[in-house]
Structure formats: structure tokens, C-alpha cells
Amino acid sequence: MKYNYIKTECRDHVYYLTLARPEKRNAFTPGMVDEIAQAIAEANESSNIALVVFQAEGPVFCAGMDLKTYQDPEQDIAHSRIGKADTSLGFVMESLNKPSLAIVRGPVIAGGFLFLLGCTYVLAEENVTFRLPEVDLGIFPFQVLPGLCRILPEKKAFQLCLDSEPFDMEKAMAYGVVDGLASDAEIQKIISSFSHTNVAMLESAMKAKRAIRTMETEDQYRYLLTRLEELKTMPDVKIRVNQTLKKS
């Protein structure tokens, strides 16, 4: 499908989703969020996709929400083949059932954090900066807070939301927002690691990761044991186990 605000491509079990609104610093609109939701749904439905890669055109990875289009919907372009979901980007990213990698080559601002916080891996170039400027506008980055609370203590996450000053790669890695430098070698290392992975296992693991967040410890282990037993019955798993046993 051809989109207005993003580009997608699938090759070698990897689904590439590119933010393609560089003239607006890849700020997302409701229509763009709907397109991302559609693309993620397509990736979720494919048994051939093991990894989703998020990247962006232009000098800015994402400047967050396009406030003009949210205030004046007439400035947005709705895709003719996609219904209006009226949903948040954070929820859309949370719906992804595949491991994901964000390749960041430009500044990340405000709601742009939702892409990073929703990804399994985040690699960024050394000179990239990060900023949550919402409090300077008299608002609060509510959508970003849940993702930050998953990687930082609640107190630190809240403090970061109240600090509108930009921070660099060193702090981004210390916070856990970024995992490493976006060198060709590191990018290829992650992509290659999914070339022969059991896709069904990955999907099960992603769903389980979300499911156990609100469970008590005993319920977590009971639930995870059930998922493990389900995986062990899959033909691909049986073949791999048998092959390993023959080598031992």
C-alpha cells in the first residue's frame, strides 16, 4: 500500500517503516498515526516478518506531534483506504507483536520518544540530541511517561518529563532510552540475528512481555509456563530441539 506520510518495505524477513515527512521534521498527525497503525497491523499479520525497523527521512528523526493539524484537522490528509482510528501513537506502538529496532540519525523531540520507547532496540548516531519541551508550552508529556516508567524509576521518569533541556547520547544511554551507536556493524548485527529466528516464538514472547506487567509474581510464572508449553508443541521448535539433541 502507498502511504501519504510513511514508506514501507519488506525484505529478508525485515519490515522497514520509514517516517517520510521530512519537510515537517516528521512530526506526526492523526492521519500519519493511522498509517503507522495500518503498517504495524500488516507486519503483525505476516508470518514472514521477524523484525520491524523504524527509520526516518531528513535531518530530524521526529519532532513529536504536529500541533497545527491536531488543532485544525483540515490541514491533515486522511488516507482514502484507512479509517480514522483516533488513537494515540503510544498505543499503536504497544500493539506491535514483533521485535523492533529504531535507527536514529537526527534529533528526537517530544512525542518522537514514543517510537524509541516502543522499540526493542534503539541505536542512535553519536551527535543526536533528545528533548521533552512540553512543559515550556504549559503541557505535560503524558503519552511519553508510561514508556519512561518502564525503563526508569518512576521518580526519575517524572523528573525527566519536567526537564525541557536537551540531552545528549551519553545521558540517553544512561537513561536506557538508547542502547548503542548506530554504526553499520551494530545495525547489521541486530538485523542478522533475526534472519533464522522462529517468528511464532517472537510473537509469543512479545505478547507475554505485555501480559505479565500487571500480574502478581506467581501468576506471571504460571502464565509463562503455559506459553512455553504451547511453543514446545510447534513443529519448528520440535525440529530445532531434535537437531540440537543429535549434535549433543
Image (cartoon, rainbow, N blue to C red):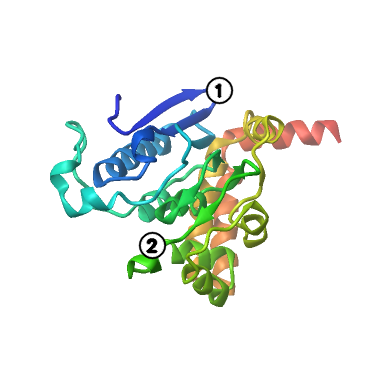
In space, the residues marked 2 and 1 are separated at their CA atoms by 33 Å
Residue nearest the viewer, comparing 125 with 218: 125
Instruction: Identify the disc placed on residue 143.
Output: 2
Q: Residue at x 64, y 52 (%)?
A: 169
Which residue ends up furthest to the bottom in the rendered image?
155
SS for dot 1: loop
Q: Quadrant of the N terminus?
A: top left
Residue underneath mark 1:
12
Q: Indicate the position of residue 195 as horizontal and vertical percent values.
A: 63, 28
Q: Is residue 166 in view from this perspective? A: yes
Q: Is mark 2 in CB contact (under 8 Å) with mark 1?
A: no
Q: Quadrant of residue 29?
A: top left
Callout 1 amino acid: Asp
Where 78 sits versus 150, above or below? Answer: above
Q: Quadrant of residue 91?
A: bottom left
Q: Indicate the position of residue 205 as horizontal and vertical percent values.
A: 55, 50
Q: Quadrant of the C terminus?
A: top right
Q: Earlier in the sequence, mark 2 or mark 1?
A: 1
Residue nearest the viewer, comparing 136 with 27: 136
Mark 1 surroundings within 10 Å by alpha-carbon count, few (fewer than 14), some (14 through 19), many (20 or more)? few
Which residue ends up furthest to the right in the rendered image?
248
Q: Indicate the position of residue 120 as horizontal and vertical percent values.
A: 57, 48
Where 224 sits versus 188, above or below? Answer: below
Q: Residue at x 60, y 43 (%)?
A: 124
Q: Indicate the position of residue 121 as horizontal and vertical percent values.
A: 59, 46
